[in-house]
Amino acid sequence: MVTAANPEDVVLFAGLSLVLGLACRHLLRGTGVPYTIVLLVLGVALGSLEYGTKHGLGKLGAGIRIWANINPDLLLAAFLPPLLFESSFFMDTHQIKKCMAQMLLLAGPGVLISTFILGAAVQFAFPYDWNWKTSLLLGGLLSATDPVAVVAHLKELGTSKKLNTIIEGESLMNDGVSVVVYQLFYRMVLGRTFSAWSIVIFLSEVSVGAIALGLAFGIVSLLWLGFVFNDTILEMTLTLAVSYIAFFTRSCPSYQAQDALELSGILTAMTLGMLYAAFAKTAFKGDSQQSLHDFWEIVAYIANTIIFILSGVAIADGVLQDNNHFQRHATSWGFLLLLYVFVQMTRLVVLSVMYPLLRSLGYGLDLKEATVIVWSGLRGAVSLSLSISVKRASDAPQPFLAPEVGTMFVFFTGGIVFLTLILNGSTTQFLLHVLGMDKLSATKLRVLSYTRYELLNKALEAFGDLRDDEELGPADWVTVKKYITYLSNLEGEHVHPHADNHEHVQTMNLRDIRVRLLNADEAMDLVASGSICDWNGLRSKVRLPSYYRFLSMSRLPQRLIKYFTVKRLESGCYICAAFLRAHRIARRQLQDFLGDSEIARIVIVESNAVGEEARMFLEEVRCTFPQLLSVLKTRQVTYSVLTHLSEYVRNLQKTGLLEEKEMVHLDDALQRDLKKLKRSPPLVKMPRVGDLLDTHPLIGVLPSTVRAPLLHNTKENVIGRGTTLYNEGSRATGIWIVSSGVVKWTSHRLSSRHSLDPILSHGSTLGLYQVLTGKSYICDMITDSLMHCFFIEAEKIDQLRRSDPSIDTFLWQVSLLIEFTDSSIDPRIFERMAMHEMRLLMANGSRMSLYTGGEDVVLEHNYVGILLEGFLKAENQNNIVPPVVLLPLNMDLKMLGLDSSAMKHMSFCYASSRYQVEARSRVIIFEAGRLLLSEANVQGSSSLL
């Protein structure tokens, strides 16, 4: 007798399902039996009592019938989105990247192979006279390794992270692809025809469209999250809502509208979750992240509980509602067992075919892991719901599917779901044990044993602090120890885990400690065969990308370019500081745990060394933009102080010193300040261009009437280490003015052996001589640190020269100083002079002379000339081209600090009684004696220098 159904009965069944789920979770804890399998059995039992007995289950049975009669697509839409999102969201991003190729192989070609093998087996071995389309439809249904069943099962078994990622990711993708294949054959069974090309187009549109839809919803919701501050409820609700909306935003399948394109909601939800896993985890801070994790764990638990019990009810319903059919066709039970064998054999074939590729991709795959993957191909609610959709289509008036076909689909699919969960699911733990995959390595056992003794020491320390109580008196240590299981039965000597000096053991210990120090999958992969190198993955995120230089040369507003550049530097500083802080904390914890172990010492040294580049970057920023680090530290301190005050106010309310209304009033003010800090943080106030250039030795001394238009046409740049400013032999297009930072030059033609200063720092002017002479650059100029500089085009320099002859002379003098520093000449006589001394020498002790063709340049005794422009000729010498040093004949080289043999080894240096001018030439002449004066004896300076 069936009880009349009331809508409230739906709630009764849901509540009972949750109670049964709680009871299973509570009673099965620690037994190793997956509670989802027990839930499925309970669901079958409830369904059997309702559908297989005369009186049923009363109001509970009425609720069961309401749930069982709900559209299967609605059931999937109600429970799958949170399950898929939760599973994808909490997968490790690095593990996904490493295992992606393996997951795609199993979920793409693997599903197609499985579909056709199962379809062919059904077509040839089963006596139901189905056509190929129907057989392949069943093959597609049964090729879906249900993520709901697989993920719930693996979480309880505690398999390795790599194996867990491959199986979980494959089940998510596999299910999405299987649903797409199902949609294709579903349409074909219902009468639609496809060409080979149209099949390819259909599969591509459905799968690629689903991925694109998931990405679109993910990007929009992530942008929204960026405007959310410290609102856990909003964050939880947004993630839940977007998972449902993304799943629902697609055409729903129906046999009445066969031409409607249905995107795979499973692929959409999976893509959304993986996008959140990759980019959104850092958006949730502190308690919000833990609360979000707990929230999704609860949602997934509730959905799992109801969907597994419902699956059991649906299996009982499918068998008992058509009991007469199965009594007439008793052989169906035998064919169900045969189909189960086909399903297992098909998965074995798929893994065997794919194994050579699976073994070589990602982390690789050994035979034991492949065996577990074969056996973990569980089927679940997704396959069952799709089979119920087929049954509903077969029950409706249409000429393509007979009602018996739909009945057999539900029977076979429900039976396979039941058998895989009961047989495969309940024996997976045993299989892991047989294969030895649940055992700890010898290294881990040694660390575990050592840790137990360390726990004993910590317990003794705690007991020493707590044993005497002013009110209650002393405690009994023997009884305390009896209640701490891990401290019981400690036998043998307290042995350090690194006491074994065997080479192989030491190597394994060293790798193990490196992994423990890093505790990050991406970094741990790098230490498998070498020292710690986790900085490699962060290097590209710290340095300024090469395209920033081209960006600075673009027509975009300089203020905008500067903003993005400073933001990039801020990010780099945060990364470096966090990296160094994390390593420092890890080193301290490792030292506290292992003491002065030799292996611990090696790993600590490696940890110190790997942070050197991060320290250098911060030092470069400190030298180039000291205000940047100050602002970043100010932000951190402000945030820390505000959060500390918020916690303090909340604690006052917990202890009763503040009433809740008072606490809310104070905390709201602090939260507003935190929000203000996030929205409008202290900004980096960079010095104005004019202020920086006013202090530069070249620009700062120019008259204000000349300097103003020049500054208007100056381009500001922030350039990262290793950037080439210009190349040797390239045409001179302008000059570079270094405000802060360091550059170095390299050349194929010149030698740096006698360079005064091969590395140039702030205050330098680069490329001026080449701009004045119209020659090509004579060396490669490369930044050796983060550099703040300015670029002035050659045309502006030409305009500046024509504006005032004295400025032209000044620019030539400055260009000579540059030639000294970049070694385009070989002036050993200047090696002992500092840059400021040479500037004073050019200003006070030199004169510039212009000569026309036919004139002679005659240098007085003990005077030195430098040819900057033009061509000269001396006796028994070829044409002399600039830049070179000119000396009078028989000069006393001791005045230059050189011996008499030095001339034979000096390049770019000539000695003659007179030099004939071949073309208009420019020569700077100064007295050699002034080279020996110290800086203290050089007085005064010109108006320009």
Image (cartoon, rainbow, N blue to C red):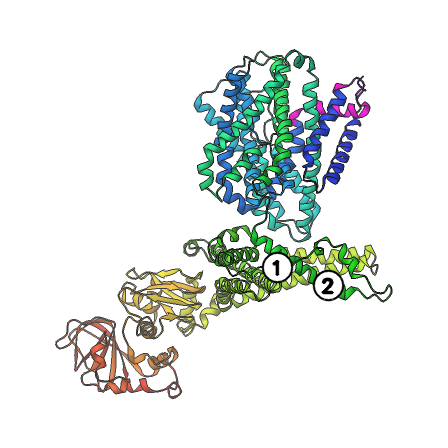
How many tags in the picture? 2
Seen in the image, is 617 located left or right of residue 938? right
**Category of crowding for the residue at label 1, using alpha-carbon neighbours closer than 10 angstroms: few (below 14), some (14–19), many (at least 20):** some
User: Would you say residue 65 sits in the magenta stretch?
Assistant: yes
Seen in the image, is 943 located left or right of residue 117? left
Residue under the image location 27 percent in, 87 percent down:
895
**Residue 124 in picture, x, y percent from top left:** 50, 16
Q: Amino acid at mark 2?
A: Leu
Q: Is residue 247 visible?
A: yes
Q: Name the image quarter holding the C terminus.
A: bottom left
Q: Nearer the viewer, residue 694 or 178?
A: 178
Say what secondary structure mark 1 lies in: loop
Q: Nearer the viewer, residue 127 or 871?
A: 127
Residue under the image location 30 percent in, 64 percent down:
777
Q: Is residue 255 visible?
A: no
Residue bearing the label numbered 1: 681
**Residue 177 in picture, x, y percent from top left:** 53, 30
Outermost residue on the left side: it is 876
Say what secondary structure mark 2 lies in: helix
Outermost residue on the right side: it is 471
Q: Is residue 403 above or below residue 596?
A: above
Q: Is residue 241 above or below residue 393?
A: below
Q: For residue 828, what is the image quadrant? A: bottom left
Residue bearing the label numbered 2: 460
Q: Name the image quarter holding the N terminus.
A: top right
Callout 1 touching callout 2 (CB < 8 Å) = no
**Category of crowding for the residue at label 2, using alpha-carbon neighbours closer than 10 angstroms: few (below 14), some (14–19), many (at least 20):** some
Task: Report the span colored magenta.
Answer: 52-73
User: Would you say residue 146 sits in the magenta stretch?
Assistant: no
**Residue 875 in picture, x, y percent from top left:** 13, 77
Outermost residue on the bottom side: it is 937
Q: Amino acid at mark 1?
A: Pro
